[in-house]
Image: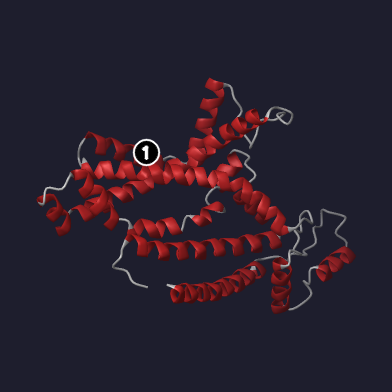
């Protein structure tokens, strides 16, 4: 076990290095330069641009810029070109904002998808299965931004409560209980919206996987032995159907950044996805590169977690 963990960590560090190199090259191959002069802004004189290039080592070769950038990043000295704030501090603040949105949406998706998918597989072709299938395809077909606007209009019209942002404007001097309830309410709608599409897709995967496993010989043997249906479905069939979902579970960590850009933009939620989008529009290269690096770390951490969960779900797999 320890040797496997050691090999896996070394492999992922090497992979992370190549990802950082490729992302750094792609950013600099893109059209335009970070120090490109804006002709509409009189403050960008040639002298200012030259001082900017020297300060951020843009006058050095690419490999030297790469070393300087990641050296400053790991020491916390990398700053945003947009507002001159620490990049790590900005990402940490946005991370804390995105984390509750990600956790609630993920919990809703994974706790509701499995009961819906398993029940659809058990009652295949019946009214429940057809209704769940129709609702799933409907949720998959509706664009997220359209569903979000419909939900906002419905809630505001019928309940007359604010839903935009992380908190209601003007609640700074209210009680702690009210602030917590207000934050919870603002968290509810974007979390539910983010979970609807995931529930629709994941429940279909659960249904198809359970139907595939349900036709195996060991499931027929378990039924022939007279085991209760709940034990057949949830102990024998579900456990053997889990492997594809372990892979999917390990890849949900990058959703902290890229999975909520539309939701965060519509609900004015100051999260990581919105910050990355704004950095791209502003050509804030330090933020873009750092977000790419954090995304790669999350992907590799997710695959590492999946490798460990494989052993727990299926004892036949050996490290």
Q: Residues within 10 Å of mark 1 (few under 14, many from 20)?
A: few
Decide: is 70 above or below 239: below
Residue 210 in percent (x, y) is at 25, 51
Decide: is 32 above or below 274: below
Q: Is residue 63 visible?
A: yes
- 81 on left or right of 207: right
Out of 9 and 18, give the one closest to the viewer. 9
Q: Residue at x 80, y 61 (%)?
A: 37
Q: Is residue 216 visible?
A: no
Q: Residue at x 36, y 65 (%)?
A: 311
Out of 64 and 186, give the one closest to the viewer. 186
Residue 278 in percent (x, y) is at 67, 51
What residue sits right under mark 1 in the picture? 138
Q: Where on the picture, by quarter, is residue 14?
A: bottom right
Say which element carries label 1.
Answer: helix
Give the quarter of the figure containing the C terminus.
Answer: bottom left
| Furthest-left residue in this view | 224
Q: Residue at x 55, y 73 (%)?
A: 13
Residue 303 in percent (x, y) is at 46, 64
Give the quarter of the figure containing the N terminus.
Answer: bottom left
Report how many numbered discs are placed on residues in the image. 1
Q: Residue at x 32, y 41 (%)?
A: 116
Residue 172 in percent (x, y) is at 73, 31
């Amino acid at each position: 076990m320890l040797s496997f963990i050691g090999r896996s960590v070394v492999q992922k560090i090497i992979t992370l290095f190549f990802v950082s190199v490729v992302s750094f090259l792609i950013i600099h191959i893109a059209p335009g330069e970070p120090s490109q002069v804006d002709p509409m802004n009189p403050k960008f004189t040639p002298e200012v641009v030259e001082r900017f290039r020297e300060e951020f080592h843009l006058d050095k070769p690419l490999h030297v810029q790469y070393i300087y950038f990641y050296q400053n990043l790991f020491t916390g000295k990398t700053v945003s070109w947009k507002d001159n704030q620490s990049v790590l501090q900005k990402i940490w603040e946005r991370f804390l904002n995105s984390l509750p949105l990600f956790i609630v949406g993920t919990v809703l998706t994974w706790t509701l998808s499995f009961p819906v998918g398993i029940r659809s597989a058990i009652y295949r072709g019946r009214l429940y299965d057809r209704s769940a299938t129709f609702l799933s395809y409907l949720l998959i077909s509706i664009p997220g931004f359209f569903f979000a606007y419909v939900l906002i209009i419905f809630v505001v019209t019928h309940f007359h409560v604010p839903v935009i942002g992380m908190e209601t404007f003007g609640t700074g001097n209210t009680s702690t209980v009210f602030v917590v309830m207000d934050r919870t309410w603002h968290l509810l709608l974007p979390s539910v919206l983010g979970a609807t599409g995931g529930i629709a897709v994941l429940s279909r995967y659960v249904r198809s996987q359970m139907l595939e496993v349900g036709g195996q010989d060991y499931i027929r043997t378990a039924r022939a032995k007279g085991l209760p249906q709940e034990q057949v479905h949830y102990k024998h069939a579900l456990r053997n159907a889990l492997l594809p979902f372990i892979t999917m579970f390990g890849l949900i960590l990058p959703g902290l950044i890229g999975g909520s850009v539309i939701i965060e933009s519509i609900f004015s939620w100051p999260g990581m996805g919105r910050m990355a989008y704004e950095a791209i529009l502003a050509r804030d290269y330090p933020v873009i590169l750092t977000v790419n690096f954090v995304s790669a770390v999350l992907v590799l951490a997710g695959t590492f977690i999946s490798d460990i969960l494989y052993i727990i779900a299926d004892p036949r797999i050996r490290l």
